[in-house]
Amino acid sequence: MQEIDFCAENKKILLESPRERPRLPNQLQRLSQRINCLKATLNREKNKMQKQQSSQRKARTRMLIQSAGLLSKSSLLEAFHITPRDNLQAYENLSKALQLLGFLITCFEENEFDEDNFERWRSVGERRF
């Protein structure tokens, strides 16, 4: 065995060399290897889940930004006097946000979502796009 003297505390610690370590029985070694393999698999799966969640968040963010662009193209933001500098979450702009939301909800509730309306809305959107 090898002795190491730690000067600060004058303690000697006995270290075992790799050759002197007791060998684990084969079965324990295999179990240890299996545990390590399962831990690695778990870590890989966690990473996959994190990437998928990140991907879903990015896709949602992209969709929200594109929807805001469509609102802008529709001139609804101008109609409700919403400017790029307006923070719609701030108290002073709350009435603008509520007016726009109320308008959208009313339009949603008063319209039928059938093929005829979808086609009519598509052609209107095509002209504006």
Image (tube, helix red, strand yellow):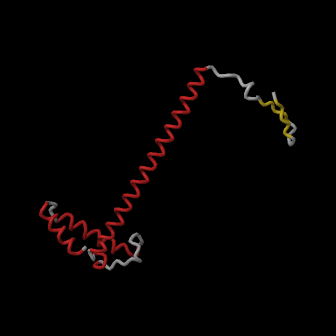
For the residue pair 2 and 64, the one nearer the viewer reads as 2
In the displayed structure image, the side of residue 8 where residue 16 appears, left or right: left
For the residue pair 96 and 72, the one nearer the viewer reads as 72
Residue at 49 percent of width and 37 percent of height: 41
For the residue pair 56 and 37, the one nearer the viewer reads as 37
In the displayed structure image, the side of residue 107 where residue 21 appears, left or right: right
Quadrant of the image occupied by residue 67: bottom left
Quadrant of the image occupied by residue 89: bottom left
- The N terminus: image quadrant: top right
Residue at 76 percent of width and 29 percent of height: 17
In the displayed structure image, the side of residue 83 where residue 37 appears, left or right: right
In the displayed structure image, the side of residue 113 where residue 81 appears, left or right: right
Residue at 57 percent of width and 24 percent of height: 30
For the residue pair 1 and 5, the one nearer the viewer reads as 1
In the picture as drawn, the residue positioned furthest to the front comes out as: 19
**Does 85 sit above or below residue 24?**
below
Give the x, y percent position of residue 116: 12, 63
Give the x, y percent position of residue 99: 29, 73
Residue at 13 percent of width and 60 percent of height: 115
